[in-house]
Image (cartoon, grey):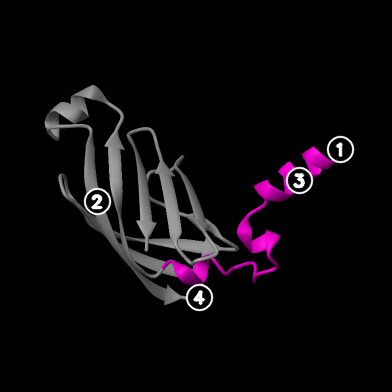
Amino acid sequence: MNKFSLALLFCSLPLSLSFGAEPNDNCSKISGHWQGIYTLKNAADCSIYNGCTHLVAADVSTIDSDKFRIKLNPAIGQGGVFEITCENGVIASPVNPGNTVSLNCDESNHCFVVYDDERLSSEMAKP
């Protein structure tokens, strides 16, 4: 492995591993208010919702050390309340099985979530 490959590998590690933070550190940062967008993938859904991309907000509260409640408020469409788990920076959501969720927080404690499933994708940030 050359120096470039090693540097690339180091840069691709999650911040919690790269800087020696607690493994569950990002999970402890997800409570609070989030804002972002969601984009529908199906043209028929876009027609129903008068466009494909819309604003969305979420309020996340802690239930337990690894369990959280999310109140989702899309600008267009129906919101809802559901629970997720977060362990070692990995979010698991029972909503829409087959989804992927990634959570990243930078050194300034700004956190970002990317959600993707068959119907839509969403990007949200917590300032």
View extreme (front): residue: 3
Q: Earlier in the sequence, mark 4 or mark 3?
A: 3
Mark in the foreground, 2 or 1: 1
Amino acid carrying mark 2 in the image:
Val
**Percent coordinates x, y for residue 103 in the rendering:** 49, 54
Residues under labels 1 and 3: Cα distance?
9 Å
Q: Range of the magenta residues?
A: 1-30
- The disc placed on residue 65 is 4
Residues under labels 4 and 3: Cα distance?
34 Å
Please say if the residues under marks 4 and 3 sit with CB atoms less than 8 Å apart: no
Q: Residue at (43%, 52%) from the top-left corner?
A: 113
Residues under labels 1 and 4: Cα distance?
40 Å
Amino acid carrying mark 1 in the image:
Asn
Taking 68 as reference, is 115 above or below it? above
Packing grade of label 2 (10 A; few <14, some 14-19, many >=20) is many
**Percent coordinates x, y for residue 70 in the rendering:** 32, 63
The residue singled out by tag 3 in the image is: 7
Packing grade of label 4 (10 A; few <14, some 14-19, many >=20) is few
View extreme (right): residue: 1
Q: Residue at (48%, 62%) from the top-left corner?
A: 85
Q: Quadrant of residue 72?
A: bottom left
Please say if the residues under marks 4 and 2 sit with CB atoms less than 8 Å apart: no
Q: Could you say whether the residue bearing mark 2 is in a helix, strand or loop? A: strand
**Percent coordinates x, y for residue 80 in the rendering:** 23, 56
Q: Earlier in the sequence, mark 4 or mark 2?
A: 2
